[in-house]
Amino acid sequence: MDSASTHAYDDVRRPAPRAPRALATEAVHAGRDDLARQGLHAPPIDLSTTYPSYDSRGEAERIDAFATTGAEPDGPPVYGRLGNPTVARFETALARLEGTESAVAFASGMAALSAVLLVRAAQGLRHVVAVRPLYGCSDHLLTAGLLGTEVTWTDPAGITDALRPDTGLVLVESPANPTLAEVDLRAVAHACGSVPLLVDNTFATPVLQRPATAGARLVLHSATKYLGGHGDVLAGVVACDEEFAGRLRQVRFATGGVLHPLAGYLLLRGLSTLPVRVRAASATAADLAGRLAADPRVARVHYPRIGGAMVAFEVHGDPHEVIAGVRLITPAVSLGSVDTLIQHPASISHRIVDADDRRGAGVSDRLLRMSVGLEDVEDLWADLDAALGVAAQDGRGAGRGARSTASSGV
Ligand SMILES: *Cc1c(COP(=O)(O)O)cnc(C)c1O
């Protein structure tokens, strides 16, 4: 096999299997279907920034074709910002898992969302309809109008009325960050009419929910979270039809928010264990949600109907003391890693959202968001139980002299 065909996208994109395959099978085979024929087992990492070609006439044609449709050039790639074969493997695999024609990867979840907004703004469709809560920075990007877009916030029932002739996008998260609120995706897709619906599927992953089958045109992931799954890759991806994917590639090429090939490799590797990780962590999360709901120190537990590895809960005591009190669980923003993380959205992930808007979206100042990992459930509960004990003691002590001085000094 010569090196040109080793690098060719047609190999990486080599189609689909003889018969539809189950998600667990796709997770370990999609994006790798050409490997055995190439005499390889692990996917190659192609770190090239540029690609030699003695045929500059052909190169010109391929660049013209890209400028027209955004389709990945046939044959070898041209330049790293235009596309990369290792990243293309991850894109192929994720598209297969989400059940879409294509997927386009970016340097982060925010770069992916920005590219979607830019595609629509370039078509003169600057108005966005969105349902709160969203991830804090997505909310901020829309509210601040940093990309020249204008947002109308509504609840799912108000979507149809909020649509305008210049509406380019409807944006929802389900389950939402950080309250795990869910929307009926089918009903929302119907309410959008011909306006593309973007569902941020970061929390559910395609293991629990495939929004494209419910009518979403665009499915977005912060791949930093469950898809990577090990807390060591920053990435984003949009799964969609090939027409929209072409426009996203054109924006990615022109604005440069590309994913590094090493990250593409790690993401493909992460996908292979995604179903196992999500199911195992979800079982532990459901167990912990039940224990928290039965605990008198906990005021309210949020756990989605579709399940998942995220649990949010409101405490009677001081949430900052729970964060300070954990020992096994890591107090950190982000989610979806093999280890359990906990954070206080009002202080960190949703700090950038105006306090009234945040509270209005159901993000209480006493809310904690926990991303459950793969540890043993009893070890996790022991840690949570101890941290909740610290918080409860602090709550009781707050009326006393020394304690109240200490807490009012914070
Ligand atoms: C983290 C997150 C994002 C942003 O992704 P980055 O990879 O951090 O840029 C978007 N949406 C949701 C739901 C997230 O949790």
Image (cartoon, helix red, strand yellow):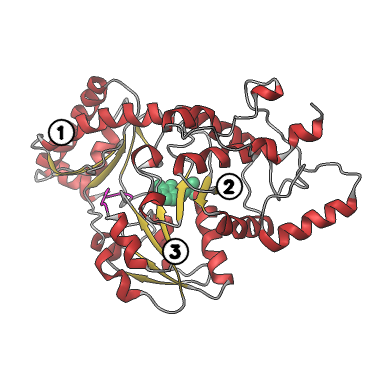
Quadrant (top left/top right/bottom left/bottom right) for the N terminus: top right
Residue 34 on the magenta span: no
Tag 1–tag 2 contact (CB < 8 Å): no
Looking at the rendering, the stretch of residues picked out in magenta corresponds to: 177-182
Residue 133 appears at what percent x and percent y? Answer: 31, 57
- Work out how far the residue at label 1 is from the one at label 3, CA to CA, in angstroms: 37 Å
Q: Nearer the viewer, residue 325 or 33?
A: 33
Residue 178 on the magenta span: yes
- Indicate which disc, 3 or 2, sits on the residue closer to the N terminus: 2
Marks 3, 2: nearer the viewer? 3
Answer above or below: position of 320 versus 217: above
Ligand 1 within 8 A of label 2's CB? no
Q: Residue at x 80, y 43 (%)?
A: 50
| Residue 181 in the figure: left or right of residue 104 | left
- Indicate which disc, 1 or 3, sits on the residue closer to the N terminus: 3
- Indicate which disc, 1 or 2, sits on the residue closer to the N terminus: 2
* Secondary structure mainly formed by the magenta segment: loop
Q: Which residue is mark 1?
A: 290
Determine which of the numbered discs, if any, sits on residue 196 in the image.
3
Asked which secondary structure carries label 1, the reply is helix
Residue 265 appears at what percent x and percent y? Answer: 60, 32
Q: Is residue 229 visible?
A: yes
| Residue 30 in the figure: left or right of residue 396 | right
